[in-house]
Image: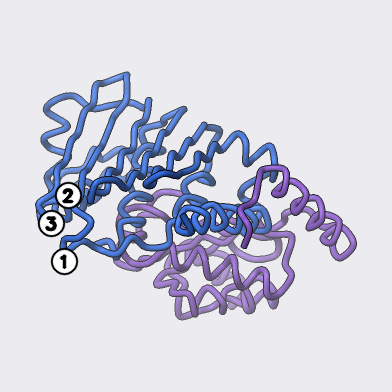
Chain colours: A purple, B blue
Amino acid sequence: MAKMSLDDLRAMRDQKRRELEMRDADNKTVQIIVGMGTSGIAAGAKNTLSAFLAELEQHGLTNVSLRQTGSLGLDHAEPTVEVRMADMPTVIYGKVTPKVAGEIVRSHIMNKTLVDEHVFDRPAADILERKEQ
Amino acid sequence: MHASLADLLLDLVHNAVNAKAATIAVRWAERDGALDIKVADDGSGMSEETQQRALSPFYTDGVAHPTRKVGLGLPFLVQTVDSVGGEFRLDSEPGRGTVVAVLLPVDHVDLPAHGDLSECFAYALAVTGPREVVIDRVAIDDGYTLRRSEVEDALGDLEDPESLRLLIAYIRSQEEAVWQR
């Protein structure tokens, strides 16, 4: 790869934007927040973040923002990831390996189905309501 | 324990974010058989007493997590430095910020792998919040500087996965140029 300049980067950004606008005009409606505290990084959160980047690209999802935060407070379950989106409870997933990151994108974000075995926090009230119905 | 030096660096950058720094300056320099890594911020800083306690794994400021009893970020770094006979420096002052610097011998058998520097630098630039992040990558006869304000100007929102992917590709091209020299 030839060494890129910032102008090259702008040109690539403009090209990508044109492609994305043709494919999908949605705004960001999904937030993926990866816990990057010490325990998260030690457990592989950087690889988890990279896995989300790759999986989102593979499925052409353009309505997602990918954020970093400090520890989400569940050190025993690192790497941890919070997912916020419409029509789904806000969920903190735990033990999110790169493989699980792929499952979250495909199941939670694309099919609106929780990845039950990795849910560690915040879904209770919503889930109970749904299950009672 | 962190798997790579890149993980240690990213942890230090997140410490600076937690200290509410407006500017974070990172240096990653390789010269004369040593790796010189420094993270300087203008965040909340620490008193002398807090600096000493921050080096203990059984201390945390309790700000983010009031019930937590341990804080492992700096102890991990100190343990790594000790294991390779490197040098560690912590300078901090309340209200002025913190500088963490290490000097590591690159040929020591116990030195952790560098890790993926391109991803690490990209994620460091993309930390959440309105702040400037400057990364100086210094290598023998070459190097480059990354500024968050410049890459945001070129790419827009760095929390957009497409922007982040382009940023990683951009930094990889800089890294390859460094290694081709």
Quadrant of the rendered structure where residue A132 is? Answer: bottom right
Residue identifier under label 2: B75
Q: Is residue B55 visible?
A: yes
Q: How many other residues sit within 10 Å of disc 1, few (<14), some (14-19) or many (≥20)?
A: few
Helix, strand or loop at mark 2: helix
Q: CA distance from mark 2 to mark 3?
A: 14 Å
Quadrant of the rendered structure where residue A59 is? Answer: bottom right
* Quadrant housing the N terminus of chain A: bottom right
> Which callout, 2 or 1, points at the residue further toward the start of the chain?
2
Q: Chain of mark 3?
A: B
As drawn, is A17 to the left or to the right of A47? right
Q: Amino acid at mark 2?
A: Pro
Q: Chain of mark 1?
A: B
Q: Chain of mark 2?
A: B
> Which callout, 3 or 1, points at the residue further toward the start of the chain?
3
Q: In the image shown, does A45 or B62 lie closer to the viewer? A: A45
Q: Which disc, if any, is residue A109?
A: none
Residues at marks 3 and 1 on the same chain: yes
Q: Amino acid at mark 1?
A: Val
Residue identifier under label 1: B109
Q: Position of residue A15 (x, y in %)?
A: 82, 55
Q: Which disc, if any, is residue B84?
A: 3
Q: Position of residue B149 (x, y in %)?
A: 60, 34
Q: Is residue B68 visible?
A: no
The residue drawn where x is 61% and y is 50% is B159
Q: Amino acid at mark 3?
A: Val
Helix, strand or loop at mark 1: loop
Q: Nearer the viewer, mark 2 or mark 1?
A: 1
As drawn, is A34 to the left or to the right of B41? right
> Which callout, 2 or 3, points at the residue further toward the start of the chain?
2
Q: Is residue B144 above or below residue A13?
A: above
